[in-house]
Image (cartoon, helix red, strand yellow):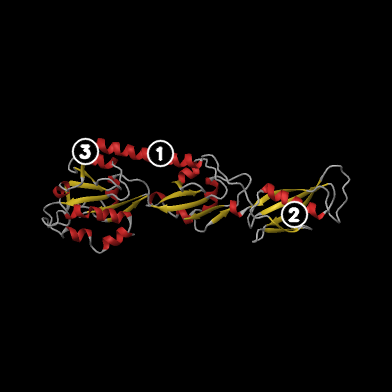
């Protein structure tokens, strides 16, 4: 069951309270205002502006916290070899390998042996040395292991080994989600930024951004960074491009495309009922406009309500005295939250179906559960 539907069910007793005395398709404005166990707030432009400023501050704080987390001190686990790792090997010695050109210098000389890949069993096959297990070893341990193996063969004088990692799948950055196909980006010595990773994964952008006017979409694109030892950190895609955010080896990036806020529109006073998604936090006026506006022939010009239920808090009914000009000003500023129910009561003179028909008609549960 979705959170939106659970909130709708929680408000059902409020909406049903007027059912036995009303013949309309929903509770009257009077019934809504008399609802028990609900805090009533008569909305004014001042309260709406304060709510808007609070919502803006909350968004800024959430973004600041996300950036602070991603820019925190890098806590990188010590590198250890794993299957699939590719490295370049150079052995240093005072003598050459059998068949090689004899050294004349008094100092150790390098002998590049080539590029090698750890097999599925975590071992690598080296010239003359044969199979050498390296999985689980650090870089220093691997170099010491290889040097000891060549020293044990007694074919080189005082050998030492230098290992340079060419690629490591365990360090690659994976970008998945709404990008078409998952993209695995190799980690390089120069590092990788979040903007670079997302840009490479988007390609031409059609899979994520779509075609046409992006300002008309109801879905917002957000980026979530999943890093070992930290909870997922999510931020808007604009911040991912605008801010300098350095990734760490092994980071996982999930690109999501979904509404930021979903609001349930109810009441015969609106032209369109159901759950409406928004790409940004909408004001009440925007939500009413998206629902087709008020039906002048049906809507009660005294009654527009916003029902809000937060976890662990008493339900709040925000009452907008729509007949007054101040309500229009407040509606332009009052920010809606996901799970809010916007209810527009009917004019008392209109006789329509009773409230159960409004709330539990066949189509509404299916819309809410999506």
Q: Residue at x 77, y 57 (%)?
A: 129
Helix, strand or loop under label 3: helix
Q: Which mark is residue 351?
A: none
CA neighbours of label 1 inside 10 A, class few (<14), some (14 to 19), many (20+): few
Whether residues under marks 3 and 1 lie with C-beta atoms below 8 angstroms apart, the answer is no
Query: Residue 92, image x and y in percent?
Result: 79, 47
Query: Residue 255, image x and y in percent?
Result: 47, 52
Give the Cα distance between marks 2 and 3. Answer: 77 Å
Q: Nearer the viewer, residue 225 or 179?
A: 225
Whether residues under marks 2 and 3 lie with C-beta atoms below 8 angstroms apart, the answer is no
Q: Which residue is mark 2?
A: 114
CA neighbours of label 2 inside 10 A, class few (<14), some (14 to 19), many (20+): few
Say left or right for 190 vs 323: right
Which quarter of the figure has residue 65? Answer: top left
Q: Which mark is residue 326?
A: 3
Q: Which residue is mark 1?
A: 61
Helix, strand or loop under label 2: strand
Q: Residue at x 33, y 38 (%)?
A: 54
Say left or right for 82 vs 360: right
Query: Residue 252, image x and y in percent?
Result: 52, 51
Task: Determine the residue located farthest toward the front in the rendered image.
Answer: 152
* Mark toward the start of the polypeptide (2 vs 1): 1
Q: Quadrant of the C terminus?
A: bottom left
Q: Is residue 86 above or below residue 332?
A: below
CA neighbours of label 3 inside 10 A, class few (<14), some (14 to 19), many (20+): some
Q: Is residue 275 above or below residue 336?
A: below
Q: Nearer the viewer, residue 53 or 171?
A: 171
């Amino acid at each position: 069951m979705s959170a939106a539907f659970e909130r709708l069910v929680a408000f059902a007793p409020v909406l049903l309270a007027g059912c036995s005395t009303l013949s309309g398709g929903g509770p009257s404005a009077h019934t809504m205002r008399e609802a028990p166990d609900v805090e009533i707030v008569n909305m004014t432009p001042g309260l709406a502006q304060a709510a808007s400023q609070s919502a803006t501050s909350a968004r800024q704080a959430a973004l600041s916290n996300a950036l602070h987390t991603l820019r925190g001190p890098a806590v990188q686990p010590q590198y250890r070899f794993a299957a699939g790792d590719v490295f370049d090997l150079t052995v240093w010695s005072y003598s050459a390998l059998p068949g090689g050109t004899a050294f004349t210098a008094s100092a150790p000389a390098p002998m590049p042996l080539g590029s090698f890949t750890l097999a599925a069993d975590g071992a690598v096959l080296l010239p003359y040395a044969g199979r050498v297990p390296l999985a689980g070893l650090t870089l220093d341990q691997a170099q010491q292991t290889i040097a000891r193996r060549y020293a044990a063969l007694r074919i080189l004088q005082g050998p030492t080994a230098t290992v340079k990692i060419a690629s490591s799948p365990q360090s690659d950055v994976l970008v998945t989600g709404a990008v078409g196909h998952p993209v695995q980006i190799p980690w390089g010595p120069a590092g990788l930024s979040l903007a670079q990773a997302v840009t490479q994964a988007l390609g031409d952008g059609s899979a994520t951004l779509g075609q046409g006017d992006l300002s008309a979409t109801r879905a917002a694109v957000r980026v979530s960074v999943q890093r070992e030892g930290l909870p997922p950190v999510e931020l808007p895609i604009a911040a991912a491009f605008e801010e300098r955010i350095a990734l760490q080896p092994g980071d996982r990036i999930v690109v999501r495309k979904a509404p930021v806020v979903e609001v349930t529109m109810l009441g015969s006073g609106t032209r369109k009922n159901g759950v409406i998604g928004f790409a940004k936090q909408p004001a009440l006026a925007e939500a009413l406009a998206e629902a087709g506006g008020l039906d002048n022939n049906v809507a009660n010009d005294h009654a527009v309500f916003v029902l809000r239920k937060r976890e662990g808090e008493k339900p709040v009914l925000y009452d907008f005295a729509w007949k007054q000009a101040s309500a229009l000003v407040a509606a332009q500023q009052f920010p809606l939250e996901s799970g809010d129910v916007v209810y527009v009561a009917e004019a008392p003179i209109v006789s329509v179906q009773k409230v159960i028909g409004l709330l539990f008609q066949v189509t509404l549960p299916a819309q809410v559960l999506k």
